[in-house]
Amino acid sequence: MLLPPLHATANADSWLRAWHFDPILAPLLTAAGVGYLIAYQTVQRSGRRPPPFWRATAYFAGLAALAIALLGPPDHFNGILFSVHMVQHLLLMLVAAPLLVLGRPAALALWALPSRPRQRIWRALLGHRPVRSSLTLLTHPFMVFLLYNGSFVAWHLPALYQAAVVDRLVHEVEHASFFGTALLFWQVLLDPRPWRRRLSTEAVVLLLFATWMVSDLLCATVTLSSELLYPVYASHSKPWGLSPLGDQRLGGAIMWIAGGVLYVALLLGYLAYPAVRRGSPSPRHARYPLTGRRTL
């Protein structure tokens, strides 16, 4: 099924009106926000320690980024402008996913449950060897690297990419792949427990550096190409005097700069963190329900 026809031009007024209501996604985003608030208040009323305010803020910022990416202008104009489509991918992978992970919604939901249901869930997840082994394999840093970067590279190959532009179902599979692997990547990078221990500084730096190099290679290929890699965009007129090739180069540059800045900032942060941690007192944290591991 082809995507619905989009406006041939993208002026300022059309950008402001480029929002749509999705009968599945909008209720899901609303439920995710309401559910988080209910769980937060339940933890507070039970006398347990809820997550810090900054984590809740990060979570709702992640939901807002998802709404902008999937219900706003990036979703409306991604069939006209390659550069806008790249902004949409960045919002899914580098903004929404890490912010949602920082909010720790799964840990909060478990912490809000009564003791017995919480213990049953943990036993189902950690008490059965096949389930535990599968989760341990899925969260292995090398597996995460392959899934996250493999998805990123594969969906930017011209054949797959153009199929996603013209077919709604393929487009939704593409976004699910980006967002799902990004959630896994950031979960393992930022807080892999209880499936495995926190990664060492060396492992984090290696994972980030390798991912940065893959991203740089793909973005450089797109940005510096003298040929139009995605001819599907040649059939639409562009705003701001952009040519199809200029739009492709702009999109590649957006990915290149945004990804590079984020990965470099994280690399520097992780390298500096051990020294900062040695000079500060250890904070108290709540613990994972049942397992006794820290969370929230």
Image (spheres, rainbow, N blue to C red):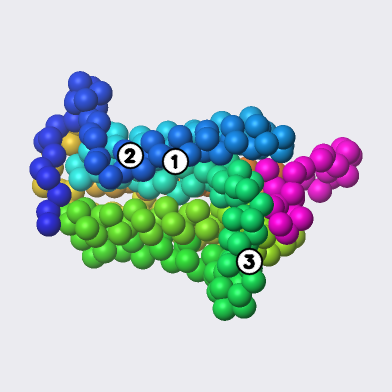
Above-or-below relation of 274 to 45: below
Local packing at callout 1 (Cα closer than 10 Å; few below 14, some 14-19, many 20+) is some
Earlier in the chain: of badge 1 and badge 3, it is 1
- What's the mark number on residue 27? 2
- What's the mark number on residue 123? 3
Location of residue 79 (image quadrant): top left
- The residue to which callout 1 is attached is 32
Looking at the picture, tell me which residue is in the foreground, 217 or 28.
28
Q: Between label 1 and label 3, give the one nearer the viewer.
A: 3
Q: Left of 112 or right of it: where is 220?
A: left
- The part of the chain drawn in magenta is 271-296
Q: Residue at x 14, y 32 (%)?
A: 9
In which quadrant of the rendered image does the C terminus lie? top right
Q: Residue at x 64, y 71 (%)?
A: 127
Q: Between label 3 and label 2, give the one nearer the viewer.
A: 3
| Residue 71 in picture, x, y percent from top left | 29, 37
Q: Residue at x 31, y 43 (%)?
A: 25
Label 1: element kind: helix
Looking at the picture, tell me which residue is in the foreground, 184 or 163.
184
Q: Left of 229 or right of it: where is 99?
A: right
| Residue 51 in picture, x, y percent from top left | 66, 37
Local packing at callout 2 (Cα closer than 10 Å; few below 14, some 14-19, many 20+) is few
Is residue 195 visible in the rendered image? The answer is yes
Magenta run includes residue 280: yes
Is residue 207 visible in the rendered image? The answer is no
Distance from Cα at disc 1 to Cα at disc 2: 8 Å
What's the amino acid at mark 3?
Arg
